[in-house]
Image: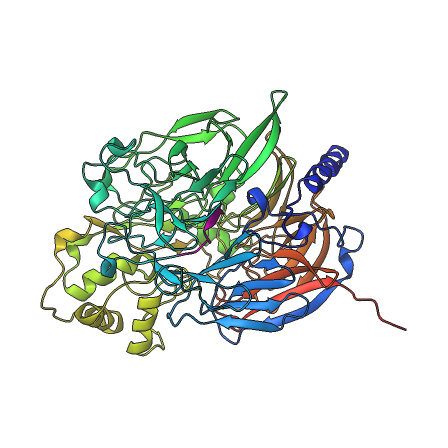
Amino acid sequence: MKNNKKLWVLAAGLLAAAMPAFGQGKDWALYGGEGGRRFSSLAQITRANVGKLEQAWRFDMAEAGDPQTHPLAVGGIVYAYTPGLDTIALDGATGKLKWRFHSGVKAGGPQRGLSLWRKRKERRLFAAAGTYLYALDPATGKPLVDFGDGGRIDLRAGLNRDVDKISLALTAPGTIWRDMIIMGFRTAESAPAAPGDIRAFDVHSGKLRWSFHSIPHPGEPGYESWPAGYWKTGGGANAWSGMVLDDKRGIVFAPTGSAVSDFYGADRTGDNLYANSLLALDASTGKLLWHFQGVHHDIADRDFPSPPVLLTVTHNGKRIDGVAQATKQGYLFVLNRLTGKPLFPVTEMPVPQSELEKLSPTQPVPSLPAPYARQHLSEGLLTNRTPQAHAWAVEQFRGFANDGPFPHMRLGQQTLAFPGFDGGAEWGGQASANGILYLNANDVAWTGGLADSAAVHGAGARLYQDNCAGCHGADRKGAPPAFPSLLDSKLIDGQMAEVIRSGRGRMPAFNFTGEKMAALLTYVRSGEDKEMAATPAAGASPAYRFTGYRKFLDPDGYPAVAQPWGTLSAIDLNSGAYLWRIPLGEYPALADKSTGSENYGGPILTKGGVLFIAATLYDKKIRAFDPRDGKLLWQAQLPYAGNATPITYMAGGRQYVLIQADNARDKKSPQGAAYIAFALIAKVKP
């Protein structure tokens, strides 16, 4: 471990010299930090004193939900979201509410951050609710009416689609470049979905400055990787997880997700550029500089799930500016930032083929680093928590199709996805210093399958199967706790309709009104169909539909694979070698406290030599680790699960570590949401 400590000392020195000028390093003014490295130059909290952290304040939001927010902190003020997606400003030293902006838009679900534009003394805070992007005065929270239409723009506009038939929302904030804000978005994962155009808007007027078509139009590179004319009707390939800016070079790096439909793509033959790709775009014009596709013709929802990380490594004796992109399938791609060429060899690995559609014969696999999540499930990797759980898992396993990290779904049979549909890596991102990447990952299995769409008759049934069954199952029973059953929902029709229109948690919003909404609600409630004047045409649906996400859990609700079920790793990207890997998280009911658990949210790193992370789902703790060797330095109990990425900042002369926590992913626990700040124990006057 001595060499690891030398690397860390060098990292701290280099990054302290490069700390951001704005706020003299006291602020957290950028989503994910500079270059997406989630690094702070603050050092009041150190390895030596981190054990003296205590809760400094707590702001309860008096509502439930899962905004998953990674806030901003500027000049001692914290900017964040509530579960209902009100934007709030809190005193960073006390947690006292300074102002609250309620847009009037019914909204919910993930809203992971905000954007701050600044020039001299002018400031603009960009926040989102539903389909709208707002420009707010950071001092008051009031909309700046010169932006768009009275202070907001509708991101559905300008996408060559009927705005009443598509839904979209922001899960990550826009990226500021000069006088523009560059936007991606989240959209539906089945048709109709918005095309994933990446767009830049003027920060003052809200007018469109440029647009990049992630589903290429005629004459644009990549057009041949789709069926002719697909750009007119296709959707997805969207940059939902957040972007990172190389400010020196004016390059924005945008990772994209899969095209719709996620699990069956016979209508989109070809490699489908620029879905599942890392794009390097000229931030001034939107021109494509290079791309790297991580999955060709994705049919397993293998989105690039987190923003990339910009870092500099020593490779073959030379210092090279690189970009590291994590994946759901457990691979880490490390690329030259200027050319997109892999720094470690990438080979095209043959993959199993489908009888239902033409797939890519190969998929890209990096030689280094080794995968941070397991790729192939076997009977030897099934749970041994109890003999009964193991026997059950073996019986189930023998009935699954098993393709490895690039699965395709079958008719009438469940197919394993390992890592699961939630990764591998997820949206929380990674932290980095001096070419060392700190990455948390899930290591559990899921399953899924396909069913014949022709077997679905009636308007309500078809609307449900096309839009809802992927999460709630063809039988409406869901896959609790991640995807609730609809058979025993306590919501009345008006409440359910509001959730459908506004979205909740990982569920996107859907623009159903009138007869469509009535037919859907009738089917959800009773399983019966309600007649409509115009029944959706059967041909509008793909031939096969996804039957629903299912976690591979044993009868007691624990992962049916061997532990660890969640990990935290330190990877030296100078060499591609792992420095350490530890289980992350616990199940409180189990005597074994080294199982690891599902985790959502990411780490941050400080000059004081501390790695902070919450993320774990069931033990509801925030932890501090020594980045040199993974040793646990401190932990604290949270009121809810810290399923977000923390920040650190200075206010009133004290360094704070702030985390947003909620129990939206753990329905068996009391629901609620709060921001909790920690600081060193204040000196008590005699």
Q: Nearer the viewer, residue 686 or 440?
A: 686
Tell me: 368 left or right of 513: right
Q: What's the residue at 52%, 26% (across, down)?
A: 344
Give the image location of residue 367, x and y in percent: 51, 27
Q: Nearer the viewer, residue 158 or 589?
A: 158
Tell me: 239 left or right of 626: left
Q: Which residues are magenta?
A: 170-177
Instruction: State yes or no: residue 172 in magenta.
Output: yes
Give the image location of residue 200, x and y in percent: 39, 47
Tell me: 253 left or right of 298: right
**Residue that sits furthest to the left in the current view:** 533
Give the image location of residue 449, x and y in percent: 30, 49
Q: Is residue 17 above or below residue 673?
A: above
* Residue 661 in view, yes or no: yes
Q: What's the residue at 70%, 39% (across, down)?
A: 17
* Residue 564 in view, yes or no: no
Q: What's the residue at 58%, 53% (across, down)?
A: 29
* Chief secondary structure of the magenta portion: loop
**Residue that sits furthest to the top in the current view:** 316
Quarter of image, res 587: bottom right
Q: Quadrant of the C terminus?
A: bottom right
Count of labels in the image: 0
Q: Quadrant of the N terminus?
A: top right
Q: Is residue 72 above or below residue 244?
A: below
Tell me: 326 left or right of 451: right
Instruction: State yes or no: residue 498 in magenta.
Output: no
